[in-house]
Every structure is written in structure tokens, then in C-alpha cells.
Amino acid sequence: MKAMKVLLIGAHGRTGRHVARRLHEEGIPFRALLRKSAHKSEFAALGAEILLGDLTHDFSHALDDITHVVYAAGSAESEGVNEERDIDRDAVMRTADYAKRRRVRQLVVVSALSAYQPQRSPLALRHYSRMKRDADDYVARRGVPFAVLRPGPLSDAPGRGTIALADERVEQMPAVSREDVAEVAVRCLLLGVTNRTIGFVGGDEPIDDALVAPAAATA
């Protein structure tokens, strides 16, 4: 079987940078898809192959020779509904299409806990949550081995290596570190977690234990 090579989409984002660091630490070859050339040196220092691209245009070539994909891109809070549609939905769908054509072995998508029930999101987040849900549903139907990650509120606190599984029924939503979200993504790659939608928040269960638990298959 061909050795793992990961395409990291959204590498320069606040979660994506943690994913890049963890891939480097695990010795996993990866290609960082970047929007701006100014960010090249940061990822070259991690041994990444660098590719510039725009998620609103055809980026299918980014998947050449790729076995696994991590989609960690997301719209910024202030960028509005057009950016949410383009980045949080349409680009994810295109990624799934490209992955299907190239028979990618696994697609890991960082979504959001609010995608379980977008209609219950605060008004300011409702469109964002709907775009996330539409993208997640498309990925699950597309026929590519997938892991959709739905973390709760994010923080920039240091990672703890622990989480708590959650879904739309959760009432308490402790923030989860972006560093731990990145760890979940990388562990999904290494453990071969596929065809699961995994909601989680900050908690005390070791990440590997949470990922192999039957409840991790929550749809």
C-alpha cells in the first residue's frame, strides 16, 4: 500500500497550524495548501511541500499523489455569509469530489458542534452552522472514507490530550483547545477512524479512548 501523504487544507489557520506541527512530529509527509506566499517559510521549516491555491477555484491538482486529506479551513467570524458559503460548504464539497476521483483513503473534515442542529444556533451563527451541516452531509454521502469532527467552542489554551464526546443533546459545552482538535484530526489519521461524525467538547477522556469508543460513531 502506498505510504501516507497528507494534504492539509487551511494549514495557516489557527487549528491548521497545530495539525501541521503534529504531522511534522509524527514524521508524516504532507503538502500544505496555502493562500499566501508570505506563509511559505513557516511550513517549509516543518518539511512540508508547499502549494499555493485558492479554495474558491479549482484546486484538484492539490490532491495529486495524496492518500489522505485534512480539511481544517474555515471562514473568519467577520467575513460574512459569502465566505461561509464558499469556504465552509462549497470548498468542502469540492474536496470530497476531488478525493472521490483520486480514491483518497481518508478525508478528515473539521466542522463544528453547532452543525448537529443549525436551527438552534444563535442567529449570528445560524448560516455558518447550516453551511457546515450541508458540507458534512455531502461528505458522508460521497463515498469517501471520512471522519467529520464537530468540536464545540474553541480556545487557544494549551492542549490537554483529552476531550469529552458530545452531540446535539449536550447542555454544558466546555471549550476545547484548538491544539486538541488538531490532535483528534491526526489521531484519526493514525488510527484509521473512518465513516464517523464525532462531536466533542473539552473533557477528561484521553483522545484515543474517545475515538475508539462506540459512541464516537454518533451521526
Image (tube, rainbow, N blue to C red):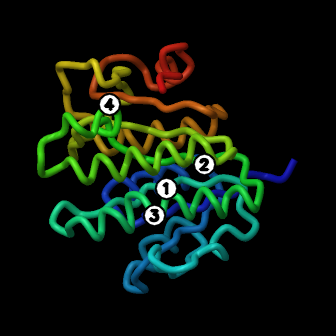
Q: Is residue 99 left or right of residue 211?
A: right
Q: Is residue 79 left or right of residue 145?
A: left
Residue where numbered disc 1 is placed: 71
Q: Secondary structure at mark 2?
A: strand
Q: Secondary structure at mark 1?
A: strand
User: Which residue is at the front of the view, 184 or 55?
Assistant: 55
Residue where numbered disc 3 is placed: 90
First in residue order: circle 4 vs circle 2: 2
Callout 2 amino acid? Leu
Q: CA distance from mark 2 to mark 3?
A: 15 Å
Residue where numbered disc 2 is placed: 107
Callout 3 amino acid? Asp
Q: Residue furthest bottom?
A: 37
Image location (x, y in percent) of residue 50: 56, 76
Callout 4 amino acid? Arg
Q: CA distance from mark 4 to mark 1?
A: 22 Å
Image location (x, y in percent) of residue 6: 63, 57
Q: Secondary structure at mark 4?
A: loop
Q: Residue furthest right?
A: 1
Q: Is residue 144 left or right of residue 132?
A: right
First in residue order: circle 2 vs circle 3: 3
Q: Secondary structure at mark 3?
A: helix
